[in-house]
Amino acid sequence: MNAKPYRICLIEDDLIMGEALSDRLDLEDFECDWFKTGREAIQALTHKHYDVVISDIQLPDINGEDLFVQLKATATTLPPFVFTTGYGTIDRAVRLLKLGAHDYLTKPLDIRALLETVKRLCVESRPAIAGENNLGISSAMRTVESLLPRIAQNSTSVLITGESGVGKEWVARALHHQHDPTGATPFIAVNCGALTETLLESELFGHVRGSFTGAVRDKKGVFELAIGGTLFLDEIGEMSPTMQVKLLRAIQERQIVRVGGETPIPVDIRLICATHQDLKKMVEEGKFREDLYYRIHVIHLHIPPLRERKEDIPWLAGRLLETWSTEHSDPRTLHRSAEKALLDHPWPGNIRELKHCLERACILSQQNVLTAELLFDEVPMAPPEHIQSVESLNEYLHACERKFIQDILRSHGGHILETATALGISRKNLWEKMKKLDIHYEADE
């Protein structure tokens, strides 16, 4: 657990079940708010931050599906939802997964499975950002991290730049955490490049009922949802000139007007913008407003690409594998050849690519130690040198297994117990394989 407990929203009308779940979550060091009706929960979810929501589908005033749809229509980002259901409503639970819910569990509940799911989703929904060296161990990232407490003392605008996948939102969340360690205020993130101009205006400022086709109810925009907290506008360089004008006005006046509305709404937020583009060059080319550029560019944090801070690669890989091991109860480590392969790779996709690379290797590997061959999509066209002379499939597999065990033995200094643990087999099984494959390795070699 982090220093700050994870906050859970529990929606359960059954008094016995609700009390049992609430007490167990408290024992596991979660902060749990228990609501017995959907309406109470909706009110809380629109005003308070939660890391995970656990909700029954059958509620006395509104069913779980309608609750989820209603929340999605009024909020940009929702915490992960885990629904509990009887066997009679599994079809509805499957529909909820298609709508964006994260998981469902059938009753009677397996408490252990529920807790494992909740812990995994908590880790994913809120990066661990308490303590030292949470952004990286390179000098560049340590410098960025050292600036965050000072920046957090003021409500000035911050611009984060860097290539796609370097972790700009990660830094934004860390800054938000510095400003609000309790997590009581919202962090709302929007990708400006993923929405058309019309949709983006409604997403930012909200709309009133009947303002356009499909506007069947009033909707708050992210500026309103982020009041008191942080609004993170990613890929702001993708914003159209018209939207740049409207954004500038909202920032300057500290108020917005919903699409189709007339009443100004004051908004007190911390604004963080991010982009992978060169905004200064875009200003010179007339593609980005100069006045908006200087308004959002009060503090500038640049995140270098992963290839320029190679010391962060093993550190990040270790943290990602640690998360995998915890979530899947499946310990994974890197072979020395894999570590070298990670350091040699240029990482055009940066941290995002590294994460997907390790996830793929963990899924494909049947061993606890990940080798270089599993990390990347490229498959060697010819067999390695040590097996080029084999004549049959059995000899090929025999040679591969022998070489793999020799490599793991070498990486653990010849210690049998450590090697067996890394391979995921018993010590006796390892001895038998070594005898069968004619492997001789002393611990002092």
Image (cartoon, rainbow, N blue to C red):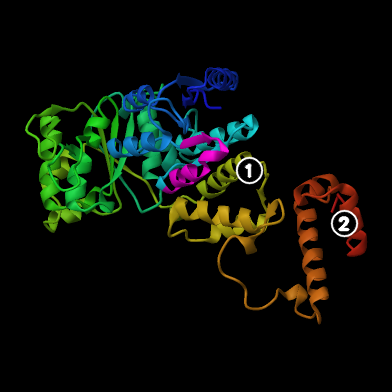
Instruction: Report whether 37 appears left or right of 324.
Output: left
Please tell me which residue lies in front, 79 or 395.
79
Which numbered disc covers residue 255? none
Q: Nearer the viewer, mark 2 or mark 1?
A: 1
The N terminus: image quadrant: top right
Q: Amino acid at mark 2?
A: Tyr
- Which residue is farthest left? 262
Please tell me which residue lies in front, 429 or 55.
55
SS assignment at label 1: helix
The C terminus: image quadrant: bottom right
| Residue identified by numbered label 1 | 328
Q: Main secondary structure of the magenta part?
A: helix
Please tell me which residue lies in front, 377 or 44.
44
- Which residue is farthest front? 88
Which region of the structure is painted magenta? 81-98
Q: Amino acid at mark 1?
A: His
Local packing at callout 1 (Cα closer than 10 Å; few below 14, some 14-19, many 20+) is few
* Residue 205 position within the rendered picture, expressed as x and y whole percent measured from the top left: 18, 38
- Residue occupying image coordinates x 48% and y 28%: 130
User: Is residue 415 depicted above or below 257 in this figure?
Assistant: below
Instruction: Report whether 181 appears left or right of 251.
Output: right
SS assignment at label 2: loop
* Residue 405 position within the rendered picture, expressed as x and y whole percent measured from the top left: 80, 59
Q: Distance of mark 2 from mark 1, alpha carbons? A: 32 Å
Q: Is residue 7 magenta?
A: no
- Residue occupying image coordinates x 14% and y 29%: 254
| Residue identified by numbered label 2 | 441
Q: Quadrant of residue 68?
A: top left
* Residue 207 position within the rendered picture, expressed as x and y whole percent measured from the top left: 16, 38
Instruction: Report whether 413 appears left or right of 305.
Output: right
